[in-house]
Image (cartoon, grey):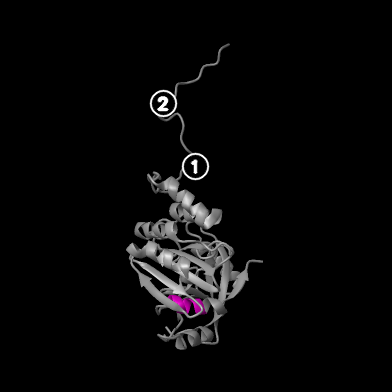
């Protein structure tokens, strides 16, 4: 499947294991196969509902925030990251009930995850 | 006239469908011998927020939690985390460190000290350290937890 266009914006669910009300955990983006949702397929409001169904497991795990980033910005951060630049891509991986699902397959280091957090636009539920 | 009741026995009652719960029981928690001391340590170094979060991670996040089928809390990571916590001096004039659970079953601490963003992740195999603003990343073994805590306290 073709990679998501750099013009698109994607969103990441932020649950209480990665947000304590004061600070965000960089492990939100650290690692490989990071799950995101595409805003061209489903709206931000729809993603709140979708995320609740998919990420609130166990039920005591609560969705607290949604972080948004542009794919082109994400790729630029990867390309310019020293000492190890990485060519980040976002690959559509639609799921039943979550058609906007996509993944960042490459490994993201803690340092790069910190750079991503700095530009992440945070949405609180209205 | 006295009322009589039939004696209970098989078939006396049956649970309605809504009351039947097949949720698996994940086990009964038995406190460790040093659990009291660890509770005190959590409260002292991370405050009520950190103490509550640790409980949350231990008791609710069973294997395959979350959308990515994540790992439950690693016992080895937990041991290293407590050894670190015993020796670390938390900054007095800033907010207490934040505690997070990683998708790999590790524990992560994050706080600020002298303008630096300090992050320490305890994984099942070792410890990862990150300090901004210069993006310094390094690793340590579990056996170096106390030594690392002292070094970061003095930094």
State the residue at coordinates (44%, 75%): A110
Q: Which residue lies furthest to the right in this view?
A: A126
Examine the rendered structure and indicate whether residue A91 appears above or below residue A96.
Answer: below
The chain under label 2 reads B
In the figure, is residue A91 to the left or right of A8? left
Range of magenta residues? A110-115
Q: Name the residue under label 1.
A: B19
- In space, the residues marked 2 and 1 are separated at their CA atoms by 20 Å
Quarter-wise, where is residue A123 in the image?
A: bottom right
Q: Name the main secondary structure of what is drawn in magenta.
A: helix
Dot 1 falls on a residue whose secondary structure is: helix
Where in the figure is residue B154, as x and y percent of width and height? 47, 67
Q: Name the residue under label 2.
A: B9
Dot 2 falls on a residue whose secondary structure is: loop
Where in the figure is residue B129, as x and y percent of width and height? 42, 71
Examine the rendered structure and indicate whether residue A3 appears above or below residue B10.
Answer: below
Query: Which numbered disc, 2 or 1, marks the residue that appears first in the sequence?
Result: 2
State the residue at coordinates (51%, 65%): A18
Q: Which residue occupies the foreground of this view, B133 or A21?
A: B133
State the residue at coordinates (46%, 35%): B14
Could you tell me which quadrant the N terminus of chain B lies in? Answer: top right
Packing grade of label 2 (10 A; few <14, some 14-19, many >=20) is few
Q: Which mark is residue B57?
A: none
């Amino acid at each position: 499947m073709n990679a998501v266009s750099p013009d698109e914006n994607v969103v990441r669910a932020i649950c209480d294991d990665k947000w304590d009300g004061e600070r965000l955990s960089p492990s939100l983006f650290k690692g490989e196969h990071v799950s995101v949702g595409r805003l061209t397929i489903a709206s931000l409001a729809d993603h709140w509902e979708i995320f609740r169904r998919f990420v609130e497991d166990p039920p005591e795990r609560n969705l607290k925030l949604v972080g948004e980033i542009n794919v082109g910005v994400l790729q630029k951060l990867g390309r310019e990251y020293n000492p190890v630049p990485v060519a980040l891509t976002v690959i559509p991986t639609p799921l039943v009930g979550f058609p906007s699902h996509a993944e960042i397959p490459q490994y993201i280091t803690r340092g790069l995850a910190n750079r991503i957090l700095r530009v992440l636009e945070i949405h609180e539920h209205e | 006239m006295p009322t009589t009741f039939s004696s209970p026995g098989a078939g006396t009652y049956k649970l309605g469908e809504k009351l039947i719960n097949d949720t698996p029981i994940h086990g009964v928690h038995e406190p460790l011998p040093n659990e009291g001391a660890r509770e005190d340590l959590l409260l002292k170094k991370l405050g009520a927020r950190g103490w509550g979060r640790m409980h949350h991670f231990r008791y609710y996040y069973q294997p395959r939690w979350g959308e990515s089928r994540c790992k439950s809390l690693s016992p080895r990571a937990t041991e290293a985390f407590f050894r670190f916590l015993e020796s670390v001096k938390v900054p007095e004039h800033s907010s207490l460190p934040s505690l997070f659970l990683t998708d790999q079953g590790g524990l992560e601490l994050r706080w600020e000290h002298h303008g630096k963003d300090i992050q320490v992740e305890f994984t099942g195999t070792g410890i990862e350290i990150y300090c901004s603003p210069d993006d310094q990343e390094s690793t340590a073994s579990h056996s170096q937890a106390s030594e690392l805590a002292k070094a970061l306290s003095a930094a």
